[in-house]
Image (cartoon, helix red, strand yellow):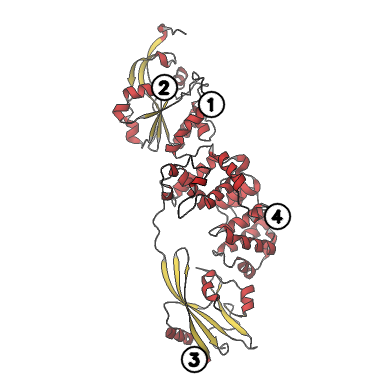
Amino acid sequence: MKLDESKRMTIKHPFPPLYDKDSRILILGSFPSVKSREEAFFYGHSQNRFWKTVAGVLSEAVPVSIEDKKAFLHRNHIALWDVIQSCDIIGSSDSSIRNVAPNDLTEIFDTADIQDVYCNGAKSYQYYEKYQEKKLGRKAIKLPSTSPANAAFSLDKLMENWKQICQPLKIASGEISPVLLKWYDYNARILPWRSDPTPYHVWISEIMLQQTRVEAVKRYYDRWMDELPTVESLAEVSEEKLMKLWEGLGYYNRARNLKAAAATIMEEYDGELPGDYEKLLSLKGIGEYTAGAIASIAFGLPEPAVDGNVLRVFSRLLAEEGEIGKMAVKKTLTREVRRVLPAERAGDFNQALMDLGAMICLPNGEPLCDRCPWESVCQAHKMQRETEFPVKAKKKPRRIEERAIFLIEGKDAQGEDKILLHKRSARGLLSGLWEFPNVEGSYTLEKAREQMKVWKIPDWQQENIEPLGEGKHIFSHVEWHMTGYHIRLKEIVKDADWTENDENWALVSRKEMEEQYALPSAFDCFRKRL
């Protein structure tokens, strides 16, 4: 069609660029269409597929209003501008452009750390090469035009080409979800709580799995469900039985929080966990990850469940350079998980991420990239920097504590062999748990004998005292270096620092210790020597 030269007009670009200091990519058009000039914003023609294409690539809803479009661009760190500042043009026709005066792009590059420049269509790319590439010293990447005139490209084909903007934006492309789910369908771990994922089963398993290996959790989970199969039974269990069921899992407040939350569920939700993310989050001991896991796996709600495994996977997937311990980085990665979370299979997707982190994208060593369903899209893998992610702050060294542990045995008034246990303070490390009597400090055998006198155990009562060797236990911020001593008494001393009426001390048989009293794993190295 021949253009009507009488309609050629000299037009100056009528609105400013959109960018901010956080912009990571710059997308350039050639010159705004008539409709865009009327709206005073980019890609205003209803048949231009720019907004549908970019929103589709980023797995977001298509923004409609200009304010929504601005928020969408800022949120996703996208800068928009055009190559041409003014020109002679007929209507919206790029082919009619004459007498070009280019825009000065340096202000954008001076303000933001632009990683890549993309040109929306051939004309934009042509003018950028001619007027701006040399000045800026930056090559641009040509993308197929989103204009309705580019009929050769369907929306799906446009999205396939435009998905490359995800890399510099550190954004996960929506296409990765079906790939992971297909992998999960064939490779999912067989776990007891997955066979019947009721809200209660998911809740208990997820709390147990915090800071604990899956293989270790399996037997604890089965024993727990035999003893406490319902929320009601958990709410009513005694403290001693609760601690015994949890013995060896560590982080014992997790168990206490379970009981407290169960009481709330009985009082406020008729014994059923609520199928609402915010209500789950309000329960004691349930954080964002656990609430997301229960909501998605048990109730099918589209909520992400982001733990350390998931953060590691996504930090490698997106080559996230920020420290993983910083809240801003966690929020960014959580947003990216939510972006690609398939609403129809949210629980499966969250579990697939857990399995990917546990089986393939391993911590503390080389991940098994050749087995990973995301190998082709993982940015860390492309750069061969897998082990550099996630980026972690240097850990502070653990505080070393020297302790002497005393295994004290003797006969009670009935002549039965008993072991002396002590209950720790209700506050602090291992609060409220039973332990072998112990004192802080480095102890020799002679000093151990002196400690017996401090506890009012005279030499004549000590049938035998012998060293048990050394042991070590690592907590998150402290490390116990322990020396053990076994003391055999002729009889339990009546006037010592403990009495039968003091609830913080207990004389127990070995069978009672094994079946009723919860001792933390910190004492296992000496417990085994009894």
Examine the image and state in which quarter residue 495 appears.
Answer: bottom right
Disc 1 versus disc 4: distance between alpha carbons? 50 Å
Q: Residues within 10 Å of mark 3 (few under 14, many from 20)?
A: few
What residue type is disc 2 on?
Ala
| Residue 142 sits above or below residue 306 on the image | above
Q: Which mark is residue 459?
A: 3
* Residue positioned 41% across, 53% down in the render: 392
* Residue positioned 49% across, 26% down in the render: 50
Q: Name the foreground residue: 517 vs 160.
A: 160
Disc 3 versus disc 4: distance between alpha carbons? 60 Å
Q: Is tag 3's residue or tag 4's residue first in the polypeptide sequence?
A: 4
Q: Is tag 1's residue or tag 3's residue first in the polypeptide sequence?
A: 1
Disc 2 marks which residue?
A: 122
- Secondary structure under the numbered disc 1 in the rendered image: helix
Disc 2 versus disc 4: distance between alpha carbons? 64 Å
What residue type is disc 3 on?
Asp
Q: Is tag 2's residue or tag 4's residue first in the polypeptide sequence?
A: 2
What residue type is disc 1 on?
Leu
Marks 2 and 1 in Cβ contact (< 8 Å): no
Q: Is tag 2's residue or tag 1's residue first in the polypeptide sequence?
A: 2
Marks 1 and 3 in Cβ contact (< 8 Å): no
Q: Residues within 10 Å of mark 2 (few under 14, many from 20)?
A: some
Disc 4 marks which residue?
A: 270
* Residue positioned 67% across, 57% down in the render: 267
Examine the image and state in which quarter residue 92 appears.
Answer: top left
Identity of the residue furthest to the front in this view? 370
Q: Residues within 10 Å of mark 4 (few under 14, many from 20)?
A: few
Q: Which mark is residue 338?
A: none
Q: Nearer the viewer, mark 2 or mark 4?
A: 2
- Secondary structure under the numbered disc 2 in the rendered image: helix
Q: Nearer the viewer, mark 2 or mark 3?
A: 2
Q: Which mark is residue 155?
A: 1
